[in-house]
Amino acid sequence: MSTNSRSLLSIEATAATLEKLINALSNYQKYTILTFIDISLFLTSIIAAIGFEWGFGAIPIGMWHLGKFIVLEIAIKIGLFWAFRIYQQVSRYIDGEFIFTIAKAVVASYLAIAVIANWFITPEIPASVLINDGMLTLILVIAFRLSVRLTMGKMRQIDAIGKNSCGVVIYGAGSAGCILAQALAGENSKRLIGFVDDSPYLQGRNIQGIRVYAPGELLKLKSISGFEEILLAMPLLDGERKRDILAKLQVLGVPIKTVPSMTEILSGHVSIGKVRELAIEDLLGREPIAARPELLQHDITDRVVLVTGGGGSIGSELCRQIAKQHPKMLIIYELHELAIYQIGMELDENYPHLHKVACLGSVTDERVLTRILTKYGVQTIYHAAAYKHVPTVEENPVAGILNNINGTLTAAKCAIECGVNKFVLISTDKAVRPTNIMGATKRVAELVLQGLADLPTHNTCFTMVRFGNVLGSSGSVVPRFREQIANGKSLTVTHADITRYFMTIPEAATLVIQAGAMAQGGEVFLLDMGEPVKIYDLAIQMIRLHGMEPHQDVSIEIVGLRPGEKIYEELLIDCNAAVPTGHPKIFCAREAKLSWNELSPQLTNLLNAATECQVTECVSALNLLVPEYQPMGQYAKVKFEALAV
């Protein structure tokens, strides 16, 4: 073993021993030790102040009675330090607020000592002695505690090296980065190497004894220190800025983690120090637009609200958002037992005062749905129940038609019969010029509500909200990529040019509620989905987020379009039909529609064919209802034969 290795082991052993000794002390023992240390610091400061005034070897004979004053002064300082709870503070976590508390205690002791010195002790003690004493006390006390903090930090770093801890760099030397650094100080599993910040003012300086580097120095720092993670401590950054930073960090080949977003922090559920994996949602998410409270509350607050498909990705998020608006009652209507149980348990934990009811049932069951709407006096329905996965519905067209079309028709008719005030359908961009059964069924569901909205025989307001993919929904591309990376598999992309619109689930649910509140009846609302994203680029970003290199550590395979899948998605049939609303993220379009008298007999034919499992007749009926439907694969022949006839 080399001399350097033996020295390092000796230092590590010493650091570990000191750490154990300190941890073995009780709080009372630590307070006592700190008190005696402060007594020595106070004695040093007053002797120095007296020496500065008269010279250390020439104190006037008449001032030798100062011994009583020194004892009294030290007693006052110790008493005030205990009163200000200075000794209850953990030295390794000293911050600006604690330094301010020390300053207040020193100033208070200075005032008390000045009064006592001038009233009860003669001859008069010069003010310069008291001022110098106060300043020296403040400097010595703060310097000692800072040195303790730095020493403890170095000890932990040395001990962490010996335990093969993970070296990390914090990107962002602002307040969030400093809080994160303090949180890491209590963890042996991570060893802070340095800060990184874009600000030239901070670069090259030390924060909490840790150097701040420029982003351009990271590659050199990695070669020297071998750090293994980057922690992004900039919760106010938007997706575009995070993408820019990620592009700079790609060459490092290390995983990137992040502190929660400001929205998550303000919710009270997490703190800045709670580091998590940097998800693709952080990069694709847009800067959130402040929700309009009056729109969120309009159809929910003090009302009885029912969510169909309340256990699904969108439905469960709608339930969360609804719970925040204090409904009179929330009814979760869901076919799957586990899904309804999970969202029910979550709501019980986070909203203990919420009055909710969990109801198992299908949207195609008219009797069950009518009984629930009548029993609870439902006023608002958010209809999220649907089969939404394109390949699955393509292989099971009858089930898709019965659930998506007949389910919507049944729920809408029940709403009319039971006097529901508002009915909001969750639609999809795949309903625009659909090439698959799922998209065609959702377009017919829109036609159903458009037709019913124009009937003068009821007072239910029907409306639809259409948007694209939501990040993290069950079966969507992001969770699939994440699972493939975790299992060491190749990422599968259907086409090199395939693009999709993306939106986070919370943003989508919030906008759905606000759009529904603006409805007058029959509108198709569109959500601003931002810029479309190439799925191939998404795969590359996700690989790099995990600290790996595409095509080297993880390959990407092009597997071909699935049945019914389009390369590009759209939000409008007629691109000139969208008009702005009072919300910058919501637009309104009055798409082409059929009157109820035209629609009803065609619906009957379609649903009869579905009931009889006549797939060819179902596809033909969908073609008649949705002329822009362009079926693919095995169903394209049905369209061709229908046109030939």
Image (cartoon, rainbow, N blue to C red):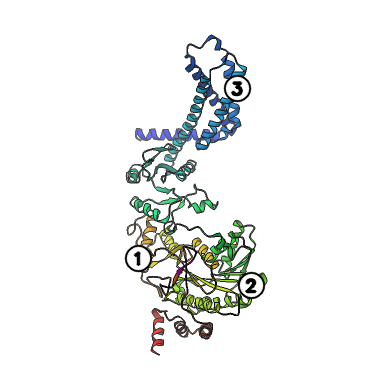
Q: Position of residue 292 (x, y in %)?
A: 53, 60
| Nearer-the-camera pick, 459 or 239 | 459
Quadrant where the C terminus lies?
bottom left
Sooner in the amino-acid sequence: mark 2 or mark 3: 3
Residue 361 versus residue 153 in the image, above or below: below
Crowdedness of circle 3 by 10 Å Cα count: few (<14), some, many (20+)? few
Inter-mark Cα distance, 3 to 1: 82 Å
Inspect this view and state whether residue 438 appears.
yes
Is label 2 in a helix, a strand or a loop? Answer: helix
Residue 503 versus residue 437 in the image, above or below: above
The residue positioned farthest toward the right in the image shown: 375
Which residue, given by chain and number where applicable, does mark 2 sit on? 373
| Nearer-the-camera pick, 554 or 514 | 514
Sooner in the amino-acid sequence: mark 3 or mark 1: 3
Amino acid type, mark 1: Glu
Which residue, given by chain and number where applicable, does mark 3 sit on? 115
Amino acid type, mark 3: Val
Give the magenta-colored segment's residue range. 579-584
